[in-house]
Image (spheres, rainbow, N blue to C red):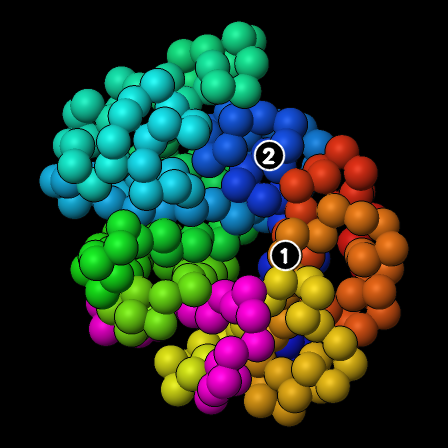
């Protein structure tokens, strides 16, 4: 799964549907698909009883009707929350989805998935282990596997221990000392970088290391054109209404 044979679409819808639908919901994935997207990024963490589900924040207030830490509630309670009304009344009643539901949706349509492991602080290794094991169980043999990514190296270590065959990517928001060595040491196939970090020397270094190059969150046309000229493999965007994935070369 190196950059020379990257198996995923170039354009990836951020959190399912970008800014057009409530993030990390099944509704968002449907909106992304309606705009022609065939690859999606989403955030996955664990409920108190260890079920992987989609949520970005450690706490529930911003994007659901719940309160407090998601890790302090069982899936039975989390699954009854409203994860849509925060965006608009038309989305009211949309629940947080389980990872199982999102995988089933993507497999039914033949779409690709980039799962960001988003552990509750202090639960990095276990979250990586559980999410990777779930994906290994859910994904059908012969299908292009999901890409597991995380800012947390411990989460990627957990993912590697649980499902070493699943491809992994290191997420970076800053060029911290040793990030490239860390990606190689974790057996990653790619680095997913803040698009502002990517320039010709950095992309060349990633290519030399045999790593794919993905960029987030690419919402402006000028940024997209610059990154495409650099030969970036994947662009994660909120503006699914602005970029046309059907035009992928």
Which residue is the extreme one toward the bottom? 208
Would you place residue 128 above or below residue 102 in this image?
Answer: below
- 239 with respect to 46 (left or right): right
Q: Position of residue 249 (x, y in %)?
A: 81, 59
- 77 with respect to 4 (left or right): left
Would you place residue 202 above or below residue 66 in this image?
Answer: below
- Look at mark 1 in the image and give the residue it sits on: 216
Label 1: few (<14), some (14–19) or many (≥20) C-alpha neighbours in 10 Å: many
- 60 with respect to 37 (left or right): left
User: Residue, x 58% and y 44% (percent of image)?
Assistant: 14
How many discs appear?
A: 2
Would you place residue 59 above or below residue 27 in this image?
Answer: below
Which span of residues is magenta-colored? 161-181
Q: Position of residue 190 (x, y in %)?
A: 54, 73
Residue 188, image quadrant: bottom left
| Residues marked 2 and 1 touching at CB (< 8 Å) | no
- Look at mark 2 in the image and give the residue it sits on: 17
Measure how far apart labels 2 and 1 are at the Cα level: 14 Å
Q: Is residue 167 visible?
A: no
In terms of secondary structure, where does tag 2 sit?
loop
Which residue is the extreme one toward the top? 89
């Amino acid at each position: 799964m190196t950059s020379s044979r990257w198996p995923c679409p170039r354009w990836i819808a951020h959190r399912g549907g970008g800014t057009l639908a409530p993030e990390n919901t099944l509704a968002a994935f449907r909106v992304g698909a309606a705009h022609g997207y065939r690859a999606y990024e989403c955030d996955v963490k664990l409920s108190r009883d260890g079920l992987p589900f989609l949520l970005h924040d450690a706490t529930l207030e911003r994007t659901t009707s719940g309160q407090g830490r998601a890790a302090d509630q069982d899936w039975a309670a989390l699954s009854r929350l409203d994860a849509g009304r925060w965006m608009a009344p038309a989305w009211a009643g949309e629940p947080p989805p389980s990872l199982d539901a999102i995988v089933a949706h993507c497999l039914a349509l033949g779409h690709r998935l980039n799962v960001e492991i988003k552990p509750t602080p202090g639960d990095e290794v276990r979250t990586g282990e559980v999410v990777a094991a779930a994906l290994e169980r859910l994904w059908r043999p012969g299908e292009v596997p999901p890409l597991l990514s995380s800012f947390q190296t411990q989460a990627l270590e957990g993912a590697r221990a649980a499902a070493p065959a699943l491809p992994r990517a290191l997420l970076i928001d800053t060029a911290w000392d040793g990030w490239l060595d860390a990606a190689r040491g974790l057996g990653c196939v790619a680095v997913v970088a803040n698009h502002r970090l990517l320039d010709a020397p950095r992309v060349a270094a990633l290519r030399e290391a045999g790593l794919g190059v993905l960029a987030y969150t690419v919402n402006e046309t000028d940024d997209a054109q610059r990154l495409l000229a650099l030969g970036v493999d994947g662009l994660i965007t909120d503006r699914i209404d602005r970029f046309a994935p059907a035009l992928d070369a």
